[in-house]
Image: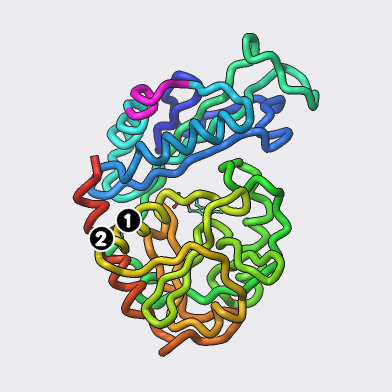
Amino acid sequence: MRSVYVNGEWVDEDKATVSVFDRGFLMADGVYEVTTVIDGKLIDLPGHAARLFRSLAELDMAAPVDAPTLEALHREAVARNGIVFGRVYLQVTRGNPGDRDFAFPDPATTKPTFVLFTQVTGSPEDNADAKRGLSVITVPDIRWGRRDIKTVQLLYPAMGKMMAKAANADDAWFVEDGLVTEGTSNNAWIVKGGRIVTRALSHDILHGITRAAVMRYAAEAQMEVEERSFTVEEAKAADEAFITSASAFVTPVISIDGVALGTGKPGPVASRLREIYIDESRKAAR
Ligand code: PMP
């Protein structure tokens, strides 16, 4: 049974509850973060913490704790649950004002709801998706205009995953004005003629912590990265493609809308970047 943190207390998961008046439940008025655990250590918690504080600030939401306390809670979540390979999820909502009302409650009287829980995964080396490569379909991006804020408003991404499943694919890439924005829960990348391409940062996509790390590692390995938008047609004609996220690391994509990329197997650039990312993350893990 998992030990879950809820508003200052560690409780067994079957005792972990929040109010029906919680704004996260009523209005998706909340944000979250996911930090990966490898070898019992946290991958880039400072990056995830910085994005959390930015998400909160963009929504005029009070931070429930400061950065050192956030770190201590992550470590406690890992220790209490004996996580070797897995994830720490955290979620902050605008709290429970005691009734339903659109107006934001007074932060002096309504404290944020703050939850942490863990999930167990396999080791990064032992990953069937990475070995096989993913098939993706493209679907219209009908999400709101502030995708840079990591909100818990995940209904359309969940629908995207269901559309992929119905099409016998692994995941979906969102498309707006003919251009790929990102994956349902990851950033999207293509490789053509040795050049690596991923969409530039804006309000249109989540500023992936893994994306930032991969940009750094690719530059260090003298790989050429272009930050620009690309069309679905360009992606289908690419040599390779891949996704990045804290959960997927770097995972190759081998087909888009049923069109096989390159050899139809995970490509050398994606495979190499996955290796570098996992090696470097392991070394930097704290
Ligand atoms: N885009 C979206 C829409 C996501 O949900 C995620 C995963 N949180 C990402 C990109 C990747 O971000 P990160 O590398 O920080 O996990």
Give, as a three-letter code, the residue at label 1.
Arg
On the image, the x and y values in percent for residue 131 come to: 35, 75
Which residue does the image show at 52% across and 26% down from the upper left? 114
Q: Dot 1: few (<14), some (14–19), or many (≥20) neighbours within 10 Å? A: some
Q: Dot 2: few (<14), some (14–19), or many (≥20) neighbours within 10 Å? A: few
On the image, the x and y values in percent for residue 176 come to: 69, 64
Q: Quadrant of residue 25?
A: top right
On the image, the x and y values in percent for residue 253 come to: 46, 74
Q: Which residues are magenta?
A: 65-71
As drawn, is 134 to the left or to the right of 99? left
Residue wearing tag 2: 220
Query: How far apart in space, not on screen, are marks 1 and 2 (Cα)?
Result: 6 Å
Give, as a three-letter code, the residue at label 2.
Glu
Task: Say which quadrant the C terminus sits in.
Answer: top left
Q: Residue furthest right?
A: 101
Which residue does the image show at 71% across and 67% down from the upper left? 177
Q: Secondary structure at mark 1?
A: helix
As drawn, is 145 to the left or to the right of 77? right
